[in-house]
Image (tube, helix red, strand yellow):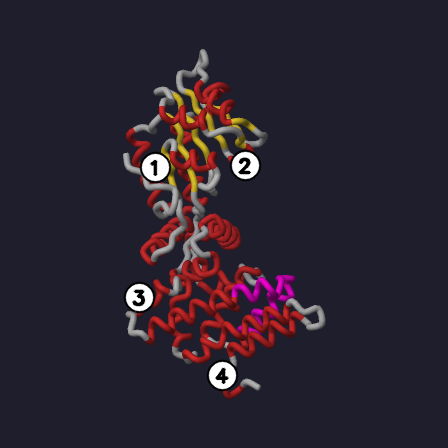
Amino acid sequence: MAFASANPGPWGGAAWKSVRQTLQRGWPPGLTVLTGDDLYHLDLAQAEILEFLAPGGSGAFGLSIFGDEPITTGALVGSARSTGMFASRRVVFLRDIAHLEGDPDPLQAYASSPGSESFLIVRAPKLDRKRKLHKALAEAGVCLGFRRAASEAELKAVSAEMSAMAVARGARISDGAARLLLDVYGPDLNRIASELDKIALWLGPEAAQAAPIDAATVRGLVAGSEILSGWELADALTKRDAAEAIAAARRLLDAGDEPIRILGGLASRARSLLRAKAMSEAGAPPNAVIDGARAWYFREALTEGLKRYTMAELLAMPGRLLEADRCLKSRSLDKGAVLEALVLGLTSPTSERR
């Protein structure tokens, strides 16, 4: 059985499939750590492992759950090694490592010799290898990494999984709607699942017979969302659409979002534009440009935007953003006005600027 390391680890969907394949042969005893930022697939794997090892909880003694209160490594391992009269298999689940205390030695000793019917499952989305205890968790037993999708191929797999999730909820979504959800929320399938729940509820019991929901309907269902407005502002900057950029910026301000945080989103997209423009002018193929700029979520907007900005205009953006940052930190200036002036300056054609 081969498992990838927790950092960076495989894409979460691939890691989940690996877990399911392993479960068909039986789960190995000892320490198993689940880590990574793809919480959707991590949670699926966690649920399937626990159900396999302790179906329905397997009685009062078969499964013990810790994590709500502080517990030492010694006590945790002691619980995993204990046996009872009514269950030959012992399964211990730690659902939050924030409350785990003590020296890593007990965990390392347990991982090296756990016993054939002893299983310790630890949920640890974030591991800091600079900490001795976290380093031991990452290296002592089996550490499964669930990484969010990053490459274009992985994002296509996420899109296909998203469509299957919609069908499971009795709804259907078009490719455009799926792409919009992916653009807005990235590969966060937990957030996307929540939006699909809303879509299915909105469509009602006749959802399966209705036409696939389109991007315009999705946009309407999440209208006013701070996330959607933030994405729309960045996308409007990318396409150099001044009117839409100003409108999106005002929606964010009206929603109470901090101007300095909005500025951070603009800076991130400006860096992507500059990197993509430099690669494009150096002769890099389109796919390499998309990969280099990490623009998988906004491919179409980037392709359009690169035609509308010169290299000189993009090189001037960091200076404009820095100036706006200094102005936003001034108590004498209206932050909303500073942000709107910045957005207008970044997106208006050069001949229209004053």
Q: Is residue 69 left or right of residue 285?
A: right
Residues in magenta?
Answer: 245-265
Residue designated by label 3? 287
The kind of residue tagged 1 is Val
Crowding near the residue tagged with mark 2, few <14, some 14–19, many ≥20 C-alpha atoms within 10 Å: some
Residue 280 appears in view: yes
- The spot of residue 67 in percent (x, y) is 54, 31
In front: mark 1 or mark 2? 2
> Real-space Cα distance between discs 4 and 3?
27 Å
- Is 163 in front, or is 110? 110
In primary-sequence order, the first of circles 2 and 4 is 2
The kind of residue tagged 3 is Asn
In front: mark 3 or mark 2? 2
Residue 353, numbered label: none
Residue 98, numbered label: 2
Residue designated by label 1? 19
- The spot of residue 119 in percent (x, y) is 40, 25
